[in-house]
């Protein structure tokens, strides 16, 4: 059994070449997962930044006052704070495919609800009271 260890000029052990160095490299799948997570994190941060920059324009275009926009941005940030740790919990219990399909389904459902929100809002207000709809600036 050989105990030969090579060292550099300062006496620190140098890594062995050959099979040990090859096994220290990350697999292609690991690199792909890490890069995907980095890009996803960047997109989330970019999304939050864009929303904060666009608040004034959203207030003008949607005819909404500042307190309402503050509530909406706070709700968005709180949702992100809940979703991020929940994702880890879900990924431990579901397969990757099931987690992906769940995420796509929730995203699609949320997008559909957001697209229908103005329509549902106006129809509900019409049914309950035309006066309330006018007071809340519904342009149906």
Image (cartoon, rainbow, N blue to C red):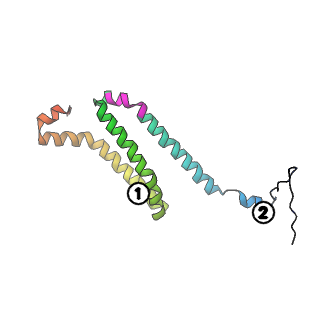
Instruction: Please identify the quarter of the rendering in which residue 18 is found.
Output: bottom right
How many numbered discs? 2
Examine the structure image and report whether residue 58 is included in the region drawn in magenta: yes
Between residue 130 and residue 68, name the one nearer to us.
68
The vertical placement of 97 against 111, above or below, is below
Label 1 neighbour load within 10 Å: few <14, some 14-19, many 20+ = some
Q: Could you say whether the residue bearing mark 2 is in a helix, strand or loop?
A: helix
Distance (Cα) linking label 2 and label 1: 41 Å
- The location of residue 138, given as percent across then percent down, is 20, 33
Which span of residues is magenta-colored? 52-59
Quarter holding the N terminus?
Answer: bottom right
| Residue that sits furthest to the front in the current view | 11
- The location of residue 16, given as percent across then percent down, is 81, 59
For the point 40% across and 51% down, which residue is it? Answer: 82
For the point 42% across and 46% down, which residue is it? Answer: 80
Between residue 70 and residue 121, name the one nearer to us.
70
| Residue that sits furthest to the bottom in the current view | 1
Quarter holding the C terminus?
Answer: top left
**Mark 1 sits on what residue?**
102
- The location of residue 11, given as percent across then percent down, is 86, 53
**Mark 2 sits on what residue?**
19
- The location of residue 137, given as percent across then percent down, is 20, 31
Q: Could you say whether the residue bearing mark 1 is in a helix, strand or loop?
A: helix
Examine the structure image and report whether residue 34 is included in the region drawn in magenta: no
Between residue 72 and residue 104, name the one nearer to us.
72
Q: Earlier in the sequence, mark 2 or mark 1?
A: 2
For the point 11% across and 34% down, which residue is it? Answer: 131
For the point 22% across and 41% down, which residue is it? Answer: 121
- Residue 14 lies left or right of residue 58; in this view the side is right
The vertical placement of 59 against 41, above or below, is above
Label 2 neighbour load within 10 Å: few <14, some 14-19, many 20+ = few
């Amino acid at each position: 059994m050989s105990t030969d260890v090579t060292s550099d000029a300062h006496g620190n052990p140098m890594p062995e070449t050959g099979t040990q160095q090859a096994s220290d490299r990350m697999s292609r799948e690991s690199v792909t997962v890490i890069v995907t997570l980095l890009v996803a994190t960047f997109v989330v941060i970019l999304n939050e930044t864009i929303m904060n920059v666009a608040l004034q324009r959203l207030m003008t275009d949607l005819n909404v006052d500042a307190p309402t926009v503050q509530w909406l941005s706070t709700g968005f940030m709180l949702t992100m704070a809940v979703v991020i740790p929940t994702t880890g919990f879900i990924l431990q219990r579901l397969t990757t495919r099931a987690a992906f399909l769940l995420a796509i389904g929730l995203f699609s459902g949320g997008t559909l609800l957001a697209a229908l929100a103005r329509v549902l809002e106006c129809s509900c207000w019409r049914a309950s009271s035309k006066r309330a709809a006018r007071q809340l600036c519904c342009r149906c």
